[in-house]
Image (tube, rainbow, N blue to C red):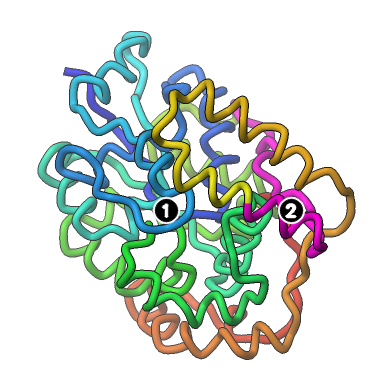
Amino acid sequence: MSLPDFLVIGVPKAGTTALHAALTRHPELFLPAVKEPKFFLSDGRPPAAGGPGDAQTYQEHVWRRADYEALFDPAPADTLRGEATPFYLYDLDAQNRIKRLVPKAKLIVLLRNPVDRAHSNWTHLWAAGLEPERDFVRACALEEERKTAGWADFWHYVSQGLYGDQLEHLFGLFSPDQVLVMRYRDLRDEPVATLDRVCTFLGVETGLLDAVPSSNVTPYVADTRVNAVLRTALRTGGQIGHHFPAPVRRLARGPLLTALQREHGGRPTLTPAERRAVLPYFAADIARLEQLTGLSYDDWLTVGLTSDVID
């Protein structure tokens, strides 16, 4: 039976891709080439899709247990097996499934300022041509409406950042020594020390990982008439593309996405006004998170600008 010994379970847009890339370089660890297999997000086939591009995303789920176990079959003997699906923390049912199937697994959580995380999430989907709402604050306000319509978890800009609720449920399932909670800024600002901390937690040799690869940086996409047409085409393709084989989808989507991301420039900046408008969604949960962890997250309550390096 090939099942993971550890999981990177959260959160989206908080450096999980970079952490995954770094850990693959450790000789005592094995992570499959498939990033985000999403196995624990459903019992059986994924649900019907509601948001733009969701149907194609659900097709990427490795939901059959045999297929999931096969991801870990190539692992060398005596290595620890792991995978990274940052939606596991948010999905409480996924947490329950993990507990049932791999109750002794070690779990790694990366937390990011929830306002910055939400904005990065929105920017990611905007750059992919899938986010129809050009105003970030308005997109957050539409969340409950989108949930009702069945849009997938990646569209839940606010709810994904309610870490207190999510961790409270997790701590009710797993012992404290099975969960490592870290901050995104630590991986960004002190990568070597943070990677050593992860290795210590997993029980493998430290000092072997000296960098976090820069990856998954959202490209710049201007809000122009031409790009509006391209985004509409991409969303339309996302709604009907699941009827076609994957190679055909990639062949059709590739040129559109290249054209949309053709420009170079700074990424959309989160303004103090936008931060001030969105922060109230998270204030109470930040206090709850502090109570759960015994750590301070006061810096998340400020309205100043931040500088992101990795996503």
Tell me how far mark 1 sits from mark 2, CA to CA. Answer: 18 Å
Q: Main secondary structure of the magenta part?
A: loop
Q: As displayed, is residue 44 above or below residue 139?
A: above
* Left or right, 28 with reference to 41: right
Q: Nearer the viewer, residue 132 or 167?
A: 132
Q: Which residue lies furthest to the left in this view?
A: 100
The disc labelled 1 sits on which kind of residue?
A: Gly
User: What residue is disc 2 on?
Assistant: 309
Residue 243, relative to residue 55: is it above or below? above
Q: In this view, does 93 lie to the left or right of 115?
A: left
Left or right: residue 112 versus residue 178 is right
> Residue 100 at what x, y percent from top left?
10, 44
- Numbered label attached to residue 10: 1
Q: Please, what is the three-letter code of the amino acid marked with disc 2? A: Val
Residue 52: percent from left, percent from top: 48, 54
Q: Nearer the viewer, residue 192 or 310?
A: 310
Q: Magenta stretch: give its range.
A: 208-232
